[in-house]
Image (spheres, rainbow, N blue to C red):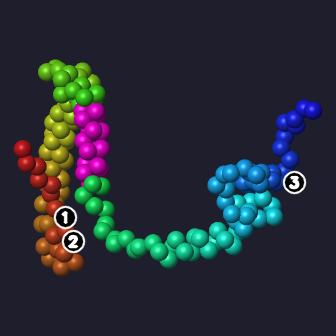
């Protein structure tokens, strides 16, 4: 009879239970007493199991709570050292050994462009300062008599460049 490929979802599989093989009455073996064998042939009933579990739980001594202990910290430290030394043996030696004295061409181009931009920005800033200085002076001379324009003239400041 062929097995179906899809398991049946409506009926759960039967639970497996360990059954005791009861020896024949005439055999001289040390089998469990008959009172422990139930009608179903199980070794112990669920009530008897529960009694045994409760008896063992009552006899068990409480363990003091010590914490992690030194062995835990030693184990974590040793594991970290193993991982780090493995990383250093594979990757770390490549990081320290292959540094060339010449810089990359792209880095040199970026550095040169940055220096050119700094020089050009400084020159533009000086040109703007030279053009704005006469305008600020003209505004200050025209607004000497007026108090409202004097307060706005103090808010205008000229940029200073330090080179």
Q: Which residues are magenta?
A: 73-88
Dominant SS type (magenta): helix
Asked where in the image residue 52 lies, by quadrant, the reply is bottom right
Within 10 angstroms of label 2, few (less than 14), some, or many (20 or more) residues?
A: few
Q: Secondary structure at mark 3?
A: loop
- Can you tell which mark lies on residue 156? 1
Q: Is residue 139 above or below residue 10?
A: below
In the image, 33: left or right of 54?
Answer: right
The answer to whether residue 137 is above or below residue 13 is below
Quadrant placement of the N terminus: top right
- The CA distance from mark 2 to mark 3 is 88 Å
Q: Residue furthest left?
A: 163
Residue 128: image location, x then y, percent: 19, 47
Judging depth in this view, the residue of 159 and 1 nearest the camera is 1
As measured in the structure, the alpha-carbon distance from the residue carrying label 1 to the one carrying label 3 is 86 Å
Seen in the picture, residue 18 relative to 121 is either above or below; the reply is below
């Amino acid at each position: 009879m062929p097995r179906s490929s899809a398991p049946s979802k409506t009926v759960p599989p039967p639970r497996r239970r360990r059954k005791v093989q009861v020896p024949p009455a005439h055999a001289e073996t040390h089998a469990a007493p008959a009172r422990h064998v139930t009608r179903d042939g199980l070794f112990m009933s669920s009530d008897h199991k529960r009694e045994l579990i409760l008896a063992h739980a009552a006899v068990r001594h409480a363990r003091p709570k010590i914490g992690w202990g030194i062995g835990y910290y030693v184990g974590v430290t040793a594991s970290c050292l193993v991982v780090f030394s493995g990383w250093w043996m594979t990757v770390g030696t490549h990081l320290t050994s292959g540094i060339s004295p010449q810089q990359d061409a792209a880095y040199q181009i970026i550095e040169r462009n940055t220096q050119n931009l700094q020089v050009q920005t400084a020159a533009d800033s000086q040109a703007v300062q030279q053009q704005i200085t006469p305008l600020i002076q003209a505004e200050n001379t025209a607004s000497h008599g007026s108090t409202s324009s004097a307060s706005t003239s103090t808010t205008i400041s000229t940029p200073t460049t330090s080179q």
